[in-house]
Image: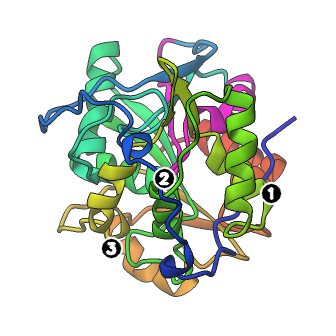
Amino acid sequence: MLLKAYTFCNFGRSCAQVRKLHLPTSLCNGRSNLSMETGPVIMSSNEYGVSSSSIDYPVLIMHGVLGSKNNWNSLAKALNKDTKRKVIALDARNHGDSPHTAEFSYDLMAMDVIYLMDQRKFNKACLIGHSMGGRAMMRVALSYPERVEKLIVVDISPIQISATLVIEKYLDLFENLTIDDNLPLSQGRRLADQLMNEYVPELDIRQFLLSNLTKVNGKFRWKANITSLKNSFENIVKFPLTTEVYNNPVLFVGGTKSDYLKVEDQDRILKYFPRAQFEYLPAGHWVHAEQPVAFLKLSAEFIKSSNE
């Protein structure tokens, strides 16, 4: 069964309405051995299948903010089956099982992708990214165009910020929430769900957010590096556009119920991605989860199509 949708467009409360829960900051800090270096990190990944031909480049997928490689399990398997290519879903730095670093930017995430490709000896790859991951993959394509066969960007634009962007509110909530370490993980998640219910009434969103809650050495931790994400928030909501152009095929897939990829932005997007094509599916921000069959069809056909 493919992923259920988690829409990030309905949490309209202001940050001030997320009251303090008088809880220690250790839950937010997570791992104590934060890297202060600005070099690449080794990202955690899930791999699906192998390429049926040595000339077929792998498909690399990156999730959105507060997500993880596991969000793409079902679609990654389906893409491998349909395209006959190796598919690798990645945990971005400061997310999932990848290292935590104080620094966080699209340039660094792009560097991480290239580092993985170098380590795996991938000359090129087809890249897919949703939301934050879409911008990271756009950064790879613009900075390292010779390494990117083609690109799929899911419901995000390089041009402007969505008016319904609510991630900062979730970060505030995470920062002010923790759980008694004496509780087992299952009870801790139930308690966190109860505490979050007042501010995030949508069960599916809470379940998505709580997938970040884990227990390490007997202590509850967020998998995502909340401190770094908050400190680097401006680096994420704005995309670093320059004069670079990526001339290979690009597929932008947006949701008709989302405002993250606006039709009126297409002309400006084409200045940076002149071979871009745009498709819209009846969905919110999580297009690939709300319309998995249609998204799979669009993506697989695009991946298998000629670059000519």
Instruction: Give the mark, 3 or 2, whose residue is nearer the N terminus.
Output: 2
Is disc 3 in contact with disc 1, using a CB cutoff of under 8 Å?
Answer: no
Q: Residue at x 48, y 58 (%)?
A: 22
> 128 and 239: which one is in front?
239
Image-quadrant location for residue 1: top right
> x%, y% of residue 240?
24, 65
Disc nearest the viewer among 3 and 2: 2
Bin the neighbour count of mark 1 within 10 Å (Cα to Cα): few under 14, some 14-19, many 20 and up: few
Circle on res. 271: 3
> x%, y% of residue 147?
30, 35
Q: Which residues are magenta?
A: 54-81
Gap in angstroms between the C-alphas marked 1 and 2: 18 Å
Q: Residue at x 27, y 59 (%)?
A: 231
The verdict on residue 74 being magenta is yes
Instruction: Give the mark, 3 or 1, whose residue is nearer the N terminus.
Output: 1
179 vs 187, left or right, is left
Judging by the rendered image, the residue that carries numbered circle 1 is 203
Placement of 55 over or under 243, stated as above or below: above
Gap in angstroms between the C-alphas marked 3 and 2: 26 Å
Disc nearest the viewer among 1 and 2: 1
Gap in angstroms between the C-alphas marked 3 and 1: 40 Å
The verdict on residue 139 being magenta is no
Observer able to see residue 246: yes
Is disc 1 in contact with disc 2, using a CB cutoff of under 8 Å?
Answer: no
Judging by the rendered image, the residue that carries numbered circle 2 is 65
Q: Amino acid at mark 3?
A: Lys
Placement of 216 over or under 100, stated as above or below: above
> x%, y% of residue 228?
30, 50
Q: Amino acid at mark 2?
A: Val
